[in-house]
Amino acid sequence: SADYVVLTDDDGRGGRERHWNDLWHFATARIANACRAFGLLPIDGPFSVIRDADGLRAAARRAAAL
């Protein structure tokens, strides 16, 4: 969704920054954490736009960074 955003904590002056993020970040992080807990390597993750090869590559790079 284009509306998915993560807000930072209040900066003490009432301001919060927005970080536009990957819709699947939470699920991907959960997969990575579960795999690490059991000594496994994650080999796949969620991605919903099947025909978007560039988007898939970008999502894979972000997932690999986790």
Image (cartoon, rainbow, N blue to C red):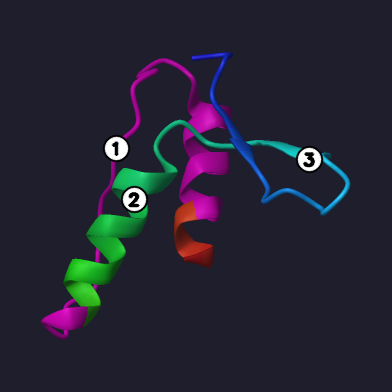
Compared to 59, does 52 lie above or below? above
Q: CA distance from mark 2 to mark 3?
A: 23 Å
Q: CA distance from mark 2 to mark 1?
A: 7 Å
Residue 17, disc: 3
Report if the CB atoms under discs 2 and 3 are less than 8 Å apart: no
Q: Nearer the viewer, residue 24 or 57?
A: 24
Residue 43 showing in the rendered view: no
The answer to whether 10 appears left or right of 55 in the picture is right
Q: Which residue is mark 1?
A: 46
Q: What stretch of residues is rendered in magenta?
A: 37-62
The answer to whether 22 appears left or right of 7 in the picture is left
Which residue is drawn at the image coordinates 49% and 14% (left, top)? 1
The answer to whether 18 appears left or right of 42 in the picture is right
What SS does tag 2 mark?
A: helix
Give the residue type at disc 3: Glu
All told, the count of numbered labels is 3
Q: Nearer the viewer, residue 13 or 20?
A: 13
Residue 28, disc: 2
Residue 4 point in image, percent of width and height: 54, 24
What SS does tag 1 mark?
A: loop
Report if the CB atoms under discs 2 and 1 are less than 8 Å apart: yes
Q: Is 49 covered by the magenta stretch?
A: yes
Report if the CB atoms under discs 1 and 3 are less than 8 Å apart: no
Residue 57 point in image, percent of width and height: 52, 41
Which residue is drawn at the image coordinates 83% and 39% (left, top)? 15
Give the residue type at disc 1: Pro
- Please identify the quarter of the rendering in which residue 49 is found: top left
